[in-house]
Amino acid sequence: MTAIASRPRRAAGGALLALGVVIGGLAALTGCGDREPKSMVPEEYRSWESTTDVELDYPIPGHEQNLRRTYINERGTEVETEARAGRVYWSYPEGTVIIKDNYASLDPAPGEAPMNQTVMVKRPDDPRSRGGWIWIVKDLKSREERIIDYEFCFDCHAVANESHPFGDENLDEEYRDYVFFPYRK
């Protein structure tokens, strides 16, 4: 009877050892490979240039009744333009980041922090991109970044590539690579 009682212990010990190996292996696998950085939105951006000198203090679909201030990283200032068939085409290089600080009203108090950010990151080969851009909304309180992987931002920004009723209205119908106010050197 003693021999029979020891068998389940050995089996249980073997099962625990196997379970430990599996858990250790999974932990090792999840630590390997290319990982997305924790944040796609840089913290230090306020020293970047703006894409426009225009104060974006008017209502607009998708951003509603909110003041917007727009910043572009140095890579984005290397935007290229080309004239084809009488139309100007803007092309932002991969790695361009455009950050739009969105405030709670059209007239925020001096020193008031933005409520969130809407961000465009140029990554044409990323499967989450739409029109070559990854579209992100960042909640500044929780620091959560949500990638908009459906057409909402893309559909609205596609209008930037033709005449539209916003801002400068793009009356020359430039292809602006989905940016309403392209960076001008």
Image (tube, helix red, strand yellow):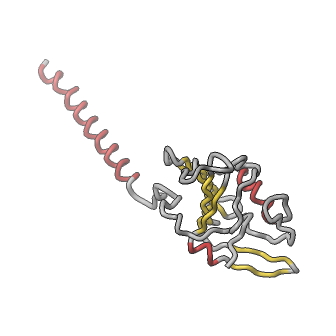
Residue extending farthest top: 1
Residue extending farthest front: 110
Q: Is residue 46 above or below residue 139?
A: below
Q: Nearer the viewer, residue 41 or 117?
A: 117
**Residue 34, image quadrant:** bottom left
Which residue appears at 71% of the width and 62% of the height? 131
Q: Is residue 42 above or below residue 22?
A: below
Which residue appears at 49% of the width and 48% of the height? 143
Residue 95 visible, this angle: no
Percent across and percent down for residue 4 are 17, 22
Q: Is residue 81 above or below residue 103?
A: below
Left or right side of 15 for 54: right
Q: Nearer the viewer, residue 63 or 67?
A: 67
Count numbered badges in the picture: 0
Percent across and percent down for residue 170 are 82, 67
Q: Is residue 132 above or below residue 91?
A: above
Residue extending farthest left: 2
Residue 92 visible, this angle: yes
Left or right side of 28 for 112: right
Which residue appears at 63% of the width and 62% of the height? 70
Percent across and percent down for residue 116 are 58, 49
Quarter of the image that includes the C terminus: bottom right
